[in-house]
Amino acid sequence: MTKIMAMAEEAIGAPSKSVYRSLADYRQHHPRILPPAFSDFVVEEGGVGAGTIIRFKVRLGGRTRTSRQRVEEPQPGRILRERDVDGTTVTTFTVTPDGKNSRVKIETTYDGARGVAGFIERLIAPRMLAKLYREELKRLDQLARDELA
């Protein structure tokens, strides 16, 4: 099985502490930064940080996939991780201070398909996910500038 990896990173116009709090708040803030490709976002358990369980749909490349994720905080205040409850997908948000602002990196890894489908997936999925994450980071930056800075 081949690991698929996609990543995007951007400067965010707010302090890292505020940005991290916003990302970790799955009831109020996090849903507001999700691009239209995400739908049916539900908090099943918790709501802030580690232990939160979320469910959502994401539409990419003409396919819609339902995902259920458990949130972890391996480094509270810096690293937030969403781990697929039923699969291999892991999405990590890393928030790094940058003066009065911050930088946020979103990185996803998962086990790709095998054979020809896997080859095509390795070519296409990282670009599609990176584009989706750049849009998410743009929305996070706008939220940060409007409400968090």
Image (cartoon, grey):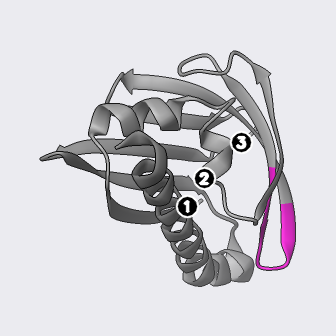
Q: Identify the disc placed on residue 87.
A: 3
- The tag earlier along the polypeptide, 2 or 3, is 2
Circle 1 sits on which residue?
Answer: 136
Task: Bin the neighbour count of mark 2 within 10 Å (Cα to Cα): few under 14, some 14-19, many 20 and up.
Answer: some
Percent across and percent down for residue 117 are 73, 78
Residue in front for this viewpoint, 146 or 130: 146
For the magenta stretch, what is the residue range?
Answer: 57-64
Tell me the quarter of the picture where residue 15 sits: top left
What amino acid is at disc 2? Ile
The residue shown at (77%, 79%) is 61
Q: Secondary structure at mark 2?
A: helix
Nearer mark to the viewer, of 3 and 1: 1
**Which circle, 2 or 3, is nearer the viewer?**
2
Reply above or below: 71 against 130. Answer: above
Queried whether the magenta region covers residue 105, the answer comes back as no
Question: Mark 1 or mark 2: which comes first in sequence?
Answer: 2
* Between 129 and 21, the one nearer to me in the picture: 21
Q: In whole angstroms, how far apart are the C-alphas of marks 3 and 1?
A: 23 Å
* Image position of 76 (left or right of 109): left
- Residue 33 is marked as 2
Of the two numbered discs 3 and 1 on the same chain, state the one appearing first in sequence.
3
Residue neighbourhood size for the residue with mark 1, other residues' Cα within 10 Å, grouped as few (<14), some (14–19), many (≥20) = many
Which amino acid lies under the numbered mark 3 shown in the image of this protein?
Answer: Gly
